Amino acid sequence: MKVDKVRLRLMLVVTVMMLNLSCCSAWFGNKRKSGRNINLPGESMSSRTSLMNHAAAGSSIVFPIYGNVYPVGFYNVTLNIGQPPRPYFLDVDTGSELTWLQCDAPCSQCSETPHPLYKPSNDFVPCKDPLCASLQPSDDYTCEDPNQCDYEIKYADQYSTLGVLLNDVYLLNFTNGVQLRVRMALGCGYDQIFSPSSYHPLDGVLGLGRGKASLVSQLNSQGLVRNVIGHCLSSRGGGYIFFGNAYDSSQMSWTPISSIHSGKHYSAGPAELVFGGRKTGVGSLDIIFDTGSSYTYFNSQAYHALISLVNKELHRKPLKVAPDDQTLPMCWHGKTPFRSINEVKKYFKPLVLSFSNGGKVRSQFEIPPEAYLIISKKGNVCLGILNGPEVGLGEVNLIGDISMLDKVMVFDNEKELIGWGPSADCNGVPKSRDVSL
Ligand SMILES: *[C@@H]1O[C@H](CO)[C@@H](O)[C@H](O)[C@H]1NC(C)=O
Ligand SMILES: *[C@@H]1O[C@H](CO)[C@@H](O)[C@H](O)[C@H]1NC(C)=O
């Protein structure tokens, strides 16, 4: 299957790790011994932050984001990191935990980056720190050097990164107008392996997953925001992400976060698949919500049920399979090229994932045709729901960017709830709805 620009940033549980670390950590260690001792005000910085915490407590942070599902294939956010702060473009990923930058440690394998490589601070996170523990595959991990936290992250698309955990300063604007320099951990990634399809010209990844090391969890433990993240991805491109309570709770539907998949992902379920208002007989679906994936992936049963229902609907409609269009595995052409989804959405029916919520009130996650179709460069309409097992996802059903378009999505790690609601406009940054912690 050849698929153009498909991204799948979903953290896999790494079972065997640190294979070649003896080489690289020693090498990173040499760098430290070479006397480049920048005097980082570690202690004073954290006390300054805590003095200022009350100024921001209960506030939130909103970041505009750039990108689209197609043709760009990802969303990026700008973060200002370091002393002095420098801007970096990061891939927005709710499917993984750690925020990291391609890093001049020096770098043994980095891709081309929009900005100069991040120069690491020498404020190392120790190996037994809880943030380091959160990035390791098991609790009884070994420390080659107790003063340093080495990690390896593998994502579902064969992308992997090897790095070391540091503290550095993030410059953040809170919605109440306060600007803070917050010292938090970040990864210095000095050895990346890309597959051509996963390559994006970015400086790093913004990990918004559920672990202790994620930025929002670190901000929360400093008393700065509630441990809640959310996003609104616009079908016209762009949108915003937020930390804290920057959303209107009046029209939200909620379902509990389930603890499957190591508790690190925003997973929910079981859900039933409904097509055009009718039950499909496909149920017991485990769902993961992941902005690191541009498209949606279904398990084999749900995928094949969907394909056959869609094809049945298209029978006697003026759409024919376009096997020569390689944009996505399944495309259809009309008599003349299409320019917008609005011209074709009448031929398709809405999908719904119906969450049982333990037998109580069901929550319906609606996926209208606009949230599962794209118009390719050739003017064909293509299905943005792909077959998970073909990319190694097995039974997992992954809701990617395409199916979360024009919705406010909220991931509340304190109440352990996932919520969604309609959005009039993801390009309008939300009015502040700040509440106290
Ligand atoms: C990332 O976003 C910035 C806007 O902040 C934009 O200028 C840049 O082109 C984007 N980078 C990529 C690779 O899309
Ligand atoms: C933060 O606020 C300052 C001052 O209001 C502004 O100049 C800057 O662009 C903002 N930075 C970000 C990342 O929004």
Image (cartoon, grey):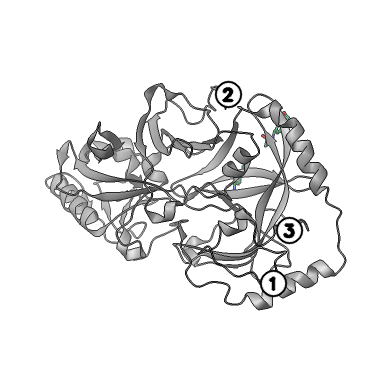
| Circles 3 and 2: CB atoms closer than 8 Å | no
Tell me the SS state at disc 1: helix
Q: Where is residue 182 in the image (x, y as percent from the top left)?
A: 71, 41
- Does ligand 1 reach within 8 Å of label 1's beta carbon? no
Q: Earlier in the sequence, mark 2 or mark 1?
A: 1
Using the rendered image of the protein, determine whether residue 350 is visible from the camera's viewpoint: no
Image-based side of 289 in relation to 380, left or right:
right
The label nearer to you, 2 versus 1, is 2
Q: Position of residue 7 (x, y in %)?
A: 45, 56
227 or 91, which is in the foreground?
227
Where is residue 202, by image quadrant? bottom right
Structural distance between the alpha carbons of marks 2 and 1: 43 Å
Residue at 27% across / 46% down in the picture? 270
Q: What residue type is labelled 1?
A: Ser
Tell me the SS state at disc 3: loop
| Circles 3 and 1: CB atoms closer than 8 Å | no
Name the residue carrying label 2.
Answer: 436
Tell me the SS state at disc 2: loop
The residue furthest front is: 140
Structural distance between the alpha carbons of marks 3 and 1: 12 Å
Query: Does 68 appear above or below 12?
Result: above
Q: Where is residue 64 in the image (x, y as percent from the top left)?
A: 58, 36
Where is residue 243, by image quadrant? top right
Residue at 39% across / 33% down in the picture? 420
Q: What residue type is labelled 3?
A: Phe
Residue at 70% across / 64% down in the picture? 148
- Where, quadrant-wise, is the C terminus in this rendering? top right
Name the residue carrying label 3.
Answer: 124
Q: What residue type is labelled 2?
A: Ser
Name the residue carrying label 1.
Answer: 25
